[in-house]
Amino acid sequence: MTLLLGIDVGTSAVKALVSDERGNIIRTASAPLDLSTPRAGWSEQDPGQWWEATVAAVRALVADPDVRPAEIGAIGLSGQMHGLVLLGPAARPPCPQALRPAILWNDQRSAPQCTHIENLAGGRAALVRACGNAALPGFTAPKILWVREHEPDAFRQSSLILLPKDYVRFCLTGQATQDVSDASGTMLLDASTRRWNHTLLSLLGLDPGLFPPVLESASPAGSLCGEAAAELGLPPGIVVAAGAGDNMAGAIGAGVVEPGQCLATIGTSGVIYTHSPTPLADLGQSGAAPSGRTHLFLAGDGDRTRPGGYSVTGCTLSAGGSLQWLHDSLFPEVSYDQLLADAAAVAPGAEGLFFLPHLTGERAPHPDPHARGAFVGLSLRHRRGHLVRAVLEGVTFTMAQILDIQRSLGLNPPPVIRLGGGGARAQLWRQMQADVYNTPVALTNTEDGPALGAAILAGVALGAWTSVPDACRAVVRETARITPERPERYAPARAVFDRLYHDLRPAFAELSQL
């Protein structure tokens, strides 16, 4: 029997799983990660910790008697997107020392560099036309410019720029590559050619030699080197696939790999991911709406013989993170199950209480690093259940706004939306999504998202399946479908909610200066 190893380099943990060629998961393991916030709005991790956690998770897997290391035929990777890893010329596997801590996807320090990039490109709309995305602090390009401006010694010593999962692949193979899906989140890839955008690199004064070759996600990217194999407890020579960014790998794990399919994932962040056969950039609407509210990325469904498709993605930064913040800050002694039960006892609209979930700035539907969270409409009647209900509704309304933007770009409303992340586990939140989206939502037989997607990519790279869509048709199936019950109950609250960010935006800009 051939086994497939999927590794997902997350923000809070590295998760690894072993599956067979039918997609049956044999075992899972994870190892926690620490997050550093040296200043307000900053978010960093030590790349070496990713490798240490990878070793710990994989060793936990191979210690299980049901997992025979000699049967592992391929390794696939997924990981948090946009993070900046700088390596010097002496970097060698495994676990090379980075020149500085990695700057992560949720770091907000590079807003001035975003403005600089847009000015160089001739404005936001021109930049979106050039690369499919607005300049946002979450992306990699402005982080590079920040390091060049504020830490010139580290920048001068840099000979290689990688993303988080690509750092782990370098540890595994000793070869530097990136996959097209993750690379498209740097702002520096040309979506039409699926190669680095040399025009934009030149405009920003960045040496193309800093960036490794890009591959389709299900392509072989090297083989497990002897040093890494010894640390992991695996035989050397195992095929290592290029892999994909966590959103793309999560879509593969949910079987969302064909045109019109849609995935709503509520984890720390919230993502509406829709697969598209053609590139659709958000250029705004005749000046009535800003450009770049959603992101044009490349999908992870390509392999060595064929290119993949595209994804239109919107990411709200504090989705499940808002519920965790509420729990940890106000009700740490109360279980999540109890909080959800309290919320279920409250009618839709939370008796006029609203929550804006912009706790760490925002990317979609409002590309605004100065956006802030807020409870609006508090009264003496409101209790714990109202607060929880308002948070759930605020996140779901925000996700629905992203879905509306995607539809305005020409994407047809999906007949069903598949669910992922913690928002798929709670019955209240599942039904709320069906009602607010006014679309049936579905659960699948796969709950391991990005890690399973990584294993599927490994299987395609090995030749276990002929393509990523074929693999998903063989592995993923719907297990439950939830239809809208009374979507009209949310309409009055949604109408008010849709105005709140715009009403408060001037105050957010002033608050960011305090």
Image (cartoon, helix red, strand yellow):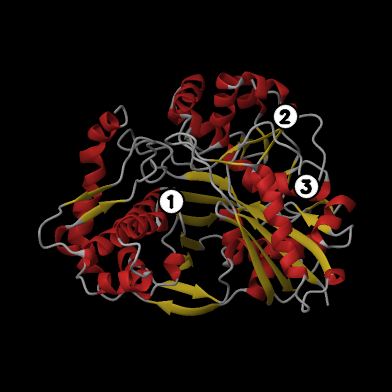
Q: Which secondary structure, mark 2?
A: helix
Asked whether the viewer can see residue 465, the reply is no
Q: Is residue 91 above or below residue 15?
A: above
Location of the N terminus by quadrant is: bottom right
Q: Earlier in the sequence, mark 3 or mark 1?
A: 3
Q: Which residue is mark 1?
A: 410
Closer to the eye: label 3 or 1: 3
Q: Position of residue 421 (x, y in %)?
A: 49, 64
Residue located farthest toward the front when viewing the structure as drawn: 333
Q: Are marks 2 and 1 in contact (CB under 8 Å)?
A: no
Q: Position of residue 242 (x, y in %)?
A: 74, 51
Q: Which mark is residue 290?
A: none
Q: CA distance from mark 2 to mark 1?
A: 36 Å
Residue displayed at 43% across by 51% down:
410
Q: Which residue is mark 3?
A: 171
Residue displayed at 46% across by 20% down:
119
Q: Position of residue 184 (x, y in %)?
A: 60, 42
Q: Is residue 73 above or below residue 154?
A: below
